[in-house]
């Protein structure tokens, strides 16, 4: 058996695939037996040979990914039954879902569940722009927080992005591991470990998932380089990169240097179907050790000329890139009125690029990204999405939600969390079921799922699949 990280993932998927095939066979046998009991005189049809491509079935891929699981139904995604779900219950569920959807999407989305890359990622972003919604991109620092994000997406029937920062990667690897500056091996190892986890479980949630790495300043490029090495190794084995996309944040550098370095990396990334997000203009505030609280206010507003310079350089390499253009947004959460956002500037970026490209008025040729969205008003978010924002970062609000779930759990069960034995029910009563870490962590996950559900409503991405 291959005991490498990728090999372990493959071995686990082999086991899961075998279990699911057996479950399908048991259900089919049970259904056949039921028909024979109900219609004993009806001539039995000869069984057809299985092709591995029956509707809703789970099959092994043949794209060089032995043991990787993929749902291969050719039916529309909204009509696809999940594992163990009958057609009747699925239809009922879809009718309920349709009644909850504020408006039907204008363009069908044909991408598989699980981590999406390359052409499928572009399809997803185009679907968001065409149908007027944005995809939440949530920073995570553990498998628990990642699973909460996936659960929220499943409940909302929405696509989602999971992203890891350099600090989050270091935490995932373990704070007991040294992570020397200029090398950052622990940051890279933790980030890769998260991507492998998301790869292993994302498809079971039934929604498209984008696996992304967040802000990478110039000093953090060793972290970026090591993730690219992992992407290239994964691409050689499976024909697609490990991550869906990466972000370079060189906004503190002069524009010419920023664009030059981004173009250099993008040329390398495009060869293996990796998407690039870059930032021009500075997002204020502080996040994960990056402090821009004292930055020149003028740098908080990117000009159309700056955005066009990026588009002009990167579009010569490929279409797979997005731009985080600053419009007064800041990281962190602040009292209403302390931050002045100008999302109308995003529309000017699109109009300027469209005019340069000779496109019709109202065209949105640029994939735009919104950072520092915590604390924004519904109106500001809606205008940003209208102007072509297809991804909005969320971190501060979900950090608070996770903590608030923990806090509420401790408050509710405090008398049972003071000792291993002894509580209000009796001096000899055990408390293990209360201090089991899974209990508190689950409460934190549930609070995060609830908060993300609100964010998905704001971004108009509920029931868009």
Image: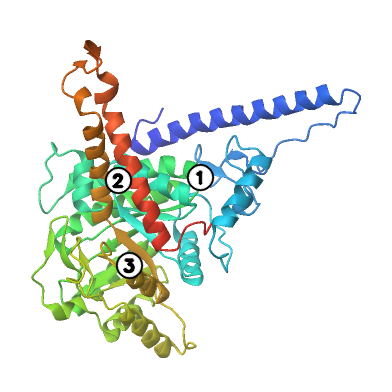
Front residue (pair 366, 373):
373
Nearer to us: label 3 or label 1:
3
Left or right side of 215 for 275 = right
Front residue (pair 164, 7):
164
Secondary structure state at the residue bearing disc 1: loop
For residue 169, say whether it is visible. Answer: yes
Residue identified by numbered label 1:
64
Left or right side of 105 for 275 = left
Does residue 456 lie above or below 144 as drawn?
A: below
Q: How is the image coloured?
A: rainbow
Nearer to us: label 3 or label 2:
2
Q: Residue furthest left?
A: 294
Does residue 76 lie above or below 459 as drawn?
A: above
Left or right side of 106 for 338 = left
| Gap between marks 3 and 1 measured at Cα | 25 Å
Q: Looking at the image, which residue is at 23% across and 55% down?
A: 396
Secondary structure state at the residue bearing disc 3: helix
Residue identified by numbered label 3:
266
Front residue (pair 432, 347):
432
Left or right side of 194 for 105 = right
| Gap between marks 2 and 1 measured at Cα | 21 Å
Residue 139 drawn at (x, y percent): 28, 52
């Amino acid at each position: 058996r291959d005991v490498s990280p990728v090999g372990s993932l493959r071995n686990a998927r082999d086991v899961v695939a075998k279990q699911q095939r057996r479950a399908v066979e048991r259900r089919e046998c049970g259904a056949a037996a039921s028909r024979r009991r109900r219609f004993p005189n009806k001539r039995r049809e000869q069984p057809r040979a299985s092709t591995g491509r029956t509707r809703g079935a789970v099959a092994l891929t043949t794209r060089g990914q032995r043991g990787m699981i993929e749902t291969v139904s050719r039916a529309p995604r909204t009509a696809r039954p999940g594992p163990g779900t009958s057609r009747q219950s699925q239809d009922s569920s879809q009718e309920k879902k349709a009644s909850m959807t504020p408006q039907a999407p204008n363009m069908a989305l044909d991408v598989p569940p699980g981590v999406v890359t390359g052409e499928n990622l572009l399809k997803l972003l185009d679907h968001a722009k065409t149908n007027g919604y944005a995809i939440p991109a949530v920073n995570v620092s553990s498998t628990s927080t990642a699973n909460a994000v996936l659960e929220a997406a499943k409940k909302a029937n929405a696509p989602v992005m999971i992203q890891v920062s350099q600090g989050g990667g270091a935490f995932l690897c373990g704070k007991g591991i040294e992570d020397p500056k200029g090398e950052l091996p622990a940051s890279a190892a933790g980030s890769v470990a998260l991507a492998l986890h998301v790869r292993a479980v994302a498809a079971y949630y039934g929604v498209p998932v984008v696996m992304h790495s967040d802000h990478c300043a110039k000093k953090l490029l060793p972290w970026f380089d090591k993730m690219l090495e992992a992407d290239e190794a994964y691409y050689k084995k499976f024909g697609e990169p490990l991550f869906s996309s990466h972000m370079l944040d060189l906004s503190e550098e002069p524009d010419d240097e920023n664009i030059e370095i981004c173009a250099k990396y993008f040329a390398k990334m495009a060869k293996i179907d990796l998407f690039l997000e870059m930032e021009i203009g500075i997002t204020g505030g502080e996040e994960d050790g990056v402090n821009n609280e004292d930055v020149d206010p003028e740098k908080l507003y990117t000009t159309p000329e700056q955005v066009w310079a990026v588009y002009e350089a990167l579009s010569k390499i490929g279409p797979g890139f997005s731009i985080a253009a600053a419009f007064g947004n800041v990281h962190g959460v602040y009292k209403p009125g302390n931050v002045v956002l100008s999302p109308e500037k995003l529309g000017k970026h699109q109009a300027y690029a469209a005019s340069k490209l000779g496109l019709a008025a109202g065209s949105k040729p640029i994939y735009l990204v919104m950072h520092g969205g915590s604390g924004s008003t519904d109106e500001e978010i809606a205008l940003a999405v209208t102007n072509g924002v297809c991804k909005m970062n969320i971190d501060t609000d979900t950090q608070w939600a996770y903590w608030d779930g923990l806090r509420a759990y401790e408050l509710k069960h405090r008398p049972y969390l003071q000792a291993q034995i002894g509580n209000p029910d009796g001096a000899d009563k055990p408390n293990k079921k209360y201090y089991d870490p899974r209990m508190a962590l689950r409460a934190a996950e549930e609070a995060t799922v609830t908060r993300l559900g609100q964010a998905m409503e704001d971004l108009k991405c509920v029931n868009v699949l």
